[in-house]
Image: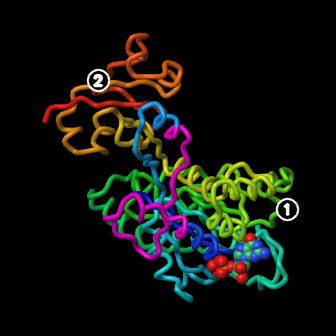
Amino acid sequence: ALTIGIVGLPNVGKSTLFNALTENDVLAANYPFATIEPNVGIVELPDERLQVLAGIFGSERILPATVSFVDIAGIVKGASEGEGLGNQFLANIRESDAIAQVVRAFTDDDVVHVGGKVDPAGDMEIINTELMLADLQTLEKALVRYEKEVKGKKLDPGVLQAAMDARALLSAGTTLSAAGFDAAPIRELGLLSAKPFIYVFNVDEGVLGDADRMDELAALVAPAKAVFLDAKIESELIGLDATDAAELLASTGQTESGLHQLARIGFDTLGLQTYLTAGPKESRAWTIGKGWKAPQAAGVIHTDFEKGFIKAEVISFDDLVACGSVAEARSKGKARIEGKDYVMQDGDVVEFRFNV
Ligand code: GDP
């Protein structure tokens, strides 16, 4: 499964947030046989459509899609030179598919800031500089090899060019993802700053209802996505029942918990989407990549579904709700039969037909 690595300077609230992520862990309940690594937290992707489907189909249970987060030990200035947990840290980030950077924006004199003052922009620069320096080191090594291989006609010159372009961007002080750099030709290098970024601003409670302040912070990282949360409130929310949690959220001016925001934006940043299945046993969301075709999507349920794919009966969620039942949707012509070239759409409620 794709994972999002959580990084940030020490004392910005990573552990607090990560504890909320793991306590919220749904995996133990829904997937009892899964092994859970201690540094992995799994959050459900909130999807109200599943409750609606469960109502229509009388489903016994609901299984939302999930997003996995990996806690990556604190980064410090000098990490790219192997300082502190530097090397281990970089190896862990390399394995993540996206990076969520927790940034301290909360003021609390009792919590020491490693840089001496609360400075979101400065903190992000420290982290991003370490990632960029690590990438430059990777590139310098690779370029020596690439140049030899191109001379020996063993490598596509386009790969060398991509590496040179990446080095130029990094030398000019921009992360590769912020520059919109296409790292596909040099994917093997696992460049850190080319991964999709999400910024998680850990703010004072009062900021959660302050659109101007949030816009200001979001502007620092645009076009990357920003999530705003108060890690302390997130950890309190975990212990509450639905009604109390909704009340606490409302009192902070939020409509959705920070964890759920993070799950939604993380899911999207990873390039993922879902399709839905429903029946008396369960209503369920299945994770696929954006742009996937029907047989590949069927393969997520079972590899046999992909191998023996015949067709898919697809009803869009809105049509199904409007019709109230599959039978009604069929009689109104809202149930579409789609073949192997069909590109899955968000909100498709699907039943696959396949040969065994
Ligand atoms: P980490 O080093 O990034 O993992 O940071 P921690 O999660 O250990 O948090 C460092 C300290 O800041 C702890 O004392 C937390 O209780 C506190 N802290 C974390 N998030 C918040 C927050 O949103 N507001 C305030 N006031 N304190 C926080």
Q: Position of residue 320 (x, y in %)?
A: 47, 23
Q: Residues within 10 Å of mark 2 (few under 14, many from 20)?
A: some
Disc ID at residue 206:
1
Side of 327 where 308 appears, left or right: left
Quarter of the image for residue 198 reads bottom right
Element type at mark 2: loop
Q: Is residue 288 visible?
A: no
Q: In this rendered view, identify the residue nearer to me: 74 or 283.
A: 283
Q: Position of residue 65 (x, y in %)?
A: 45, 49
Disc ID at residue 339:
2
Dividing the image into 4 quarters, which one contains the C terminus?
top left
Q: Is residue 219 magenta?
A: no
Residue at 48 percent of width and 46 percent of height: 271
Side of 32 where 78 appears, left or right: right
User: Ligand 1 is found in which quarter of the picture?
Assistant: bottom right
Side of 299 where 6 appears, left or right: right
Q: Position of residue 22 (x, y in %)?
A: 52, 69
Residue at 47 percent of width and 61 percent of height: 26
Q: In this rendered view, identify the residue nearer to me: 125 or 349.
A: 349
**326 w.r.t. 292: above or below:** above
Side of 270 where 287 appears, left or right: left
**Residue interval drawn in magenta:** 22-51
